[in-house]
Amino acid sequence: MSGNRLTSVTNAVRLIKSFTSTRTTWGVSELSRELGISKSSVHRILATLTDEGMLEQDPESGRYRLGLAMYDLAAAVPTQRDLHEAVLLPMTELRNRTGETVQVGVLDGIHVVYIERLDSPNTLRLFTDVGRRNEVHCTATGKALLAHLPADRRDRIVAELSLTKRTAYTITSHRKFKQELDRIRDQGYAENRHESEVGVVSVAAPIRDTGGVTIAAISVAGPAERMDPLRSQMAQAVQRAAGLVSHRLGYRGGGEHDR
């Protein structure tokens, strides 16, 4: 852990991030086991966050849930709210056009977090929960996000990556991974062909805000047997969807801040 971090603050943040769409309540003992910190420490953090309105305690069960202050904070993040509104129609069009699962992800440190998803209507389809985190080096979304960052930030993140070998197709060399990112930046989209899971293929393209800054990526993913014969069409469809979202966010292209 960095010497600049406060352990108490780090634990409080970890505790808050334990609350997800699939795990909305926690007890003290459960959080202690989940976070690997003592029950007394968990209790103190919970008491403080509850006093500040960040959490609420059910008077009957004694379990904790997110408080109203968290929703106030979420409402104060216009980029995420605007992004949610901007992606809905292009995501639907992309899912209908390709018949595959469509996702939108954002960068969070050295991980990609999926914040929006529309499932494929096909019987054989992929399931990725909204809020799920994945590694950036073996996902199309993660690679698209990294490739379109400013070079100095991209290089700092790449230096932190362990490049875990998920399959025989995963890139595990930092030199080759940097070359892959350069190629992605040049062509405008990223591919994941069996790199995170054998048999799964995905294609992603960057979403830019009004200043040309890449803030998210949209991807389409499905079984290789359906995706591979249509790789070119999938890439074009994803880039078109990314362009539509970016346009809805105010991006007009060609500016000096395009990166």
Image: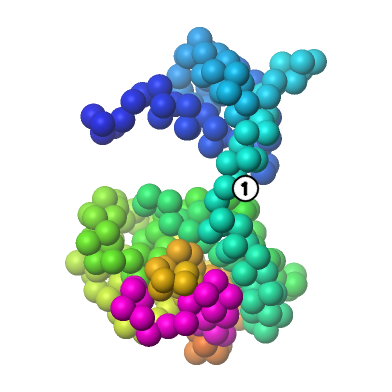
Q: Name the residue at 36% across, 76% down.
A: 258
Q: In this view, does 136 lie to the left or right of 114?
A: left
**Numbered range of the magenta stretch:** 237-259
Q: Does the magenta stretch include residue 241?
A: yes
Q: In this view, does 4 lie to the left or right of 49?
A: left
Whether residue 32 is visible here, answered yes or no, is yes
Q: Does the magenta stretch include residue 222?
A: no
208 relative to 108, above or below: below
Does dot 1 land on a helix, a strand or a loop? helix
Would you name the residue on which mark 1 appears? 75
Whether residue 30 is visible here, answered yes or no, is no
Where residue 131 appears, x then y in whole percent? 58, 50
Q: Name the residue at 31% across, 30% down.
A: 5
Foreground residue, 138 or 72? 72
Please tell me in which quadrant of the rendered image residue 157 appears: bottom left
Foreground residue, 226 or 127? 127
Asked which colour scheme the image uses, the reply is rainbow
Foreground residue, 75 or 36? 75
Where residue 228 appears, x then y in whole percent? 52, 83
**Residue type at the position of mark 1:** Ala
Where residue 170 appears, x then y in whole percent? 36, 64
| Residue furthest to the top | 40
